[in-house]
Image: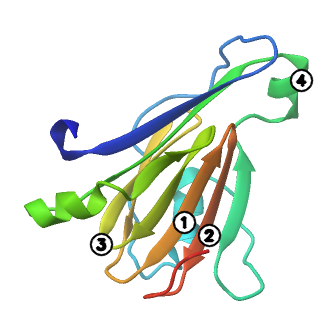
Amino acid sequence: MAHGRVMLCLLAAGLAGQASAQGAGGQGAGAPGVGMGDFCARLAADSGIDEPASPDGRTQWTVNAMNFGQRFIFGGSAATGVGVTPVEPATVEDYRRLEDMCLPKGKGAVCELAGPVNFRFTWKGRKIVTPLAPGERATISVAGTRTTCRSGAAGQPAS
């Protein structure tokens, strides 16, 4: 584990295989306070994603890194990255707890998140860090160019 970080990056190429311009890079808008909705609602707000609430009151959304034009008219590529870092100050146990939080699955990755942890999301050229509070849970899955987030109730799995 390099520098105590667990990071998975996924690259999805469009039909023409051309790189698409995804806007300016840089840090996300900042991590909002944990009291501003559940994790997936905060991640959506940080990432500029419109998220619907699920019927049970927990936020769930699925988005595609490339829109219709990028995929079928112009071709293109998009990179989505997911990873976790500990909340500082961190102990050796904190790093061990994170080792299996994000793992490859098929042509993507799944992160079974349990706070406290900082979730790192690379989305459309932006690097966003959104914290999970102690006891907060969420599941993030990335498959190709699609990313799904589902918040879980404290102490219960998100999916």
Of mark 1 and mark 4, the one earlier in the sequence is 4
**Figure check: 64 above or below 89:** above
Q: Which residue is mark 3?
A: 116
Of mark 2 and mark 3, the one earlier in the sequence is 3
Q: Amino acid at mark 1?
A: Thr
Q: Residue at x 59, y 60 (%)?
A: 44
Of mark 2 and mark 4, the one earlier in the sequence is 4
Q: Nearer the viewer, mark 1 or mark 4?
A: 1
Q: Which residue is mark 4?
A: 72
Relative placement, left or right, of 40 versus 116 is right
Q: Residue at x 38, y 74 (%)?
A: 33
Q: Are marks 2 and 1 in contact (CB under 8 Å)?
A: yes
Q: Amino acid at mark 2?
A: Arg
**In the foreground, 36 or 91:** 91
Image spot of residue 63 (x, y percent):
72, 51
Image spot of residue 72 (x, y percent):
89, 23
Residue 124 in view here: yes
Element on which disc 1 rests: strand
The numbered dot on residue 139 is: 1
Q: Amino acid at mark 4?
A: Phe
Q: Residues within 10 Å of mark 4 (few under 14, many from 20)?
A: few
Element on which disc 3 rests: loop
Q: Residues within 10 Å of mark 3 (few under 14, many from 20)?
A: some
Q: Which residue is mark 2?
A: 150
Query: Which of the 4 quarters of the picture holds residue 7?
Result: top left
Query: Which of the 4 quarters of the picture holds residue 130?
Result: bottom left
Q: Are marks 1 and 3 in contact (CB under 8 Å)?
A: no
**In the foreground, 29 or 67:** 67
Q: Residue at x 43, y 53 (%)?
A: 102
Q: Count all numbered tags in the image, as a single digit.
A: 4
**Figure check: 43 above or below 136:** above
